[in-house]
Image (cartoon, rainbow, N blue to C red):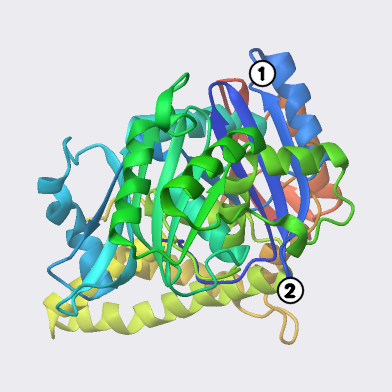
Amino acid sequence: MRLQGEMIDRVVSARLTEGKLCLLRASRSGGPVRIEAVEALDLPADAESTATARKALGERGFLGLPTVLVLSSRRAFVCLHHPSVQERKALQQTIRYEVEKEMPMPVEGMALDFDYVGNGLNGSARVLIGAVSGEELRSQLEALRPLGLSPTQATLTGAAVGNAYNALGLTNGSGRTLGLHFGDGSVDVIRLKDGAIEEMRAVPAEEGSHGNGSGLPALVRSSVVEAGIWGDLDAACVSGPPEKAEAASVEVVRELGMPVLKPDWDGLDLSGLPEGDAALLKDKGLPLFGAAAEALGAGPATSLNLLDPARQASQWLSFLRRPLRAASLAFVILLALWSAVGVVRLYEAGHGQREAASELSALWTKLHPGARLPVDPGRSLKSELSAYVAYVTPAEGSRLPMLESLLSLTKPISSTAGGLPYQKIRTNREGVLVEGSLPDYVAVDALLKRLKEEGGFEPASPEMTSRSGAVSFVIQLRRAK
C-alpha cells in the first residue's frame, strides 16, 4: 500500500529490464492523466556516462519527483489470501506470519505488501499479497540511485497493468475481465472483477510456439480456455507491443468468441508529447502508465508498496516541494512532540506505564523511522522537545523560525542534475540537519553555496562519504543572522 494518502499531482514511474531503463512522467489536476514524457535508455556502465545520463534525465524533468518503481511480476510471489484478522493495522503486523505457509520460499528476506481486493464467500476480507526478494529490490534501487532516482513506491507489473485497464476505462468498473499483457519475456495474466484483481500471475512468453496455440504461450492459452469453459467473462483485454498483442488477440477471439479490447490512448492528454515518446508509450508504457495512474488517484486501483516503511518515510520527505506540505509536516512534528509531553508525564508519574510505554514507542517510531528505540524513550523525547521548543519560540511576532527553515529548504536550491538532493531532513538544537547525495564533491560545494546565498543558511562543514559513484553528505544548517 502507498505510504501516504495525500494526492500528488505529478509523478514518475520507472522500470528496469535486462539492463534497460524505461521512464514515464505524468501529471493530473482533476481530469484525465496527462503523459508529459517517456524515455528509454541503456543503463550507463561507467561514472562519466552515468553523470551524462543523470544530467539528461534532470533536463527532461524526470528527477526530483515522487517515483514508482515497477518490478516484474515474473520474479515475484503473488497470492490471494483470507486473513485471520480484518483490521488493517493488525494485519500489517501479522501478514508475514500468515502467508509464510503459502510461500514456496522463506518469508525472511522478502519485501512484501498487500492490498484489500474484496470479500470472500463468508464475508471475510480478501487481500492480494505480493512479495519479491529483498536482494532483488535492493539491487534495482542501487542501480537507480546514481541516476538521481529514489523511488517512493515499488509495485508489480500485474498490479500496474490492472490499474492501467481501469484508468483507460477498459473494465468499465463492473463485471469480470480477463487481461493479457505481453511484456519483456513474460505475459501478465490478470482477472478483474468490478475493477479489483481476483487473479494475478506471470508466465514465460514462449517463443516460436506452433499449432493451435500459435501466438499464445501454453499456460496463457490454458487460462483463456478455462475462461471460455466457465463462460463468466464480460470482457477480454490484450495489450503489449502492437505486433505481439495483435497475434494474441486473434487467438483469444477464436477461443472465446468475443471481441477483444485494446488500450485506447485517445482518452488521455498527450498534448505536446513527441512522436517518439508516443510510440514508446504504446509499445512498452502500459505498466508505467498504470503505476503513475494509481499514484495520481485515477480510477479504482490496486496499491502495493514493497519498500520498507522506513525508506518510504525518508524518501517521501525528500519530495516536500510545496510550502504548504512543508508547513504541514512541521506542524505534524510539533503536534506529535507536544502530545509526547503528556505521555512522558504519565510515564514518569507511574500511572498506566504499559500504555504510556507503548505510546512512547509509537511516537519514537513516528519521529525517527528506522531508528533503534532508546533505553529511556521518555527522556530522549523530553530532551528533543526542549530543543524544539527553544527553536520554535517566536522571535518576532508570530514568526516561527523552524517553519521558515523548512520552507526555505523547499525553494529551488536543487542540484544542477535536477530535483532536491535531500534524502532526510531533521531538526535539532542547532537548527536543521540535512542528509542526501550528489554525483561528486564539486556538486556538494555548489549546494553549500546555494544554501548560503539563496536559502539564507549558514552551513557547517559537511560530513562527506564517497561510494558507488556518488557522494553522501550530512550538513548542519543554521539560519543566517
What residue type is disc 1 on? Pro
> Is 144 on the left or on the right of 307, as rendered?
right
Say few, some or many: other residues with alpha carbon within 10 Å of mark 2 (under 14 / 14 to 19 / 20 or more). Answer: few
Tell me which residue sits at (20%, 75%) in the image. 86
- The picture quadrant where one finds residue 51 is top right
| Frontmost residue, 192 versus 124 | 192
x and y percent of residue 324 in the render? 69, 74
User: Which image quarter holds the N terminus?
Assistant: bottom left
User: Which image quarter holds the C terminus?
Assistant: bottom right
Is 245 above or below relative to 86? above
What residue type is disc 2 on? Gly
Do tag 1 and tag 2 residues touch (Cβ < 8 Å)? no
| Frontmost residue, 336 versus 217 | 217
Residue, disc 1: 44
Residue, disc 2: 31
Going from N to C along the chain, the mark reached first, 1 or 2, is 2
Tell me the tag on residue 213.
none
Is 68 above or below relative to 386? above
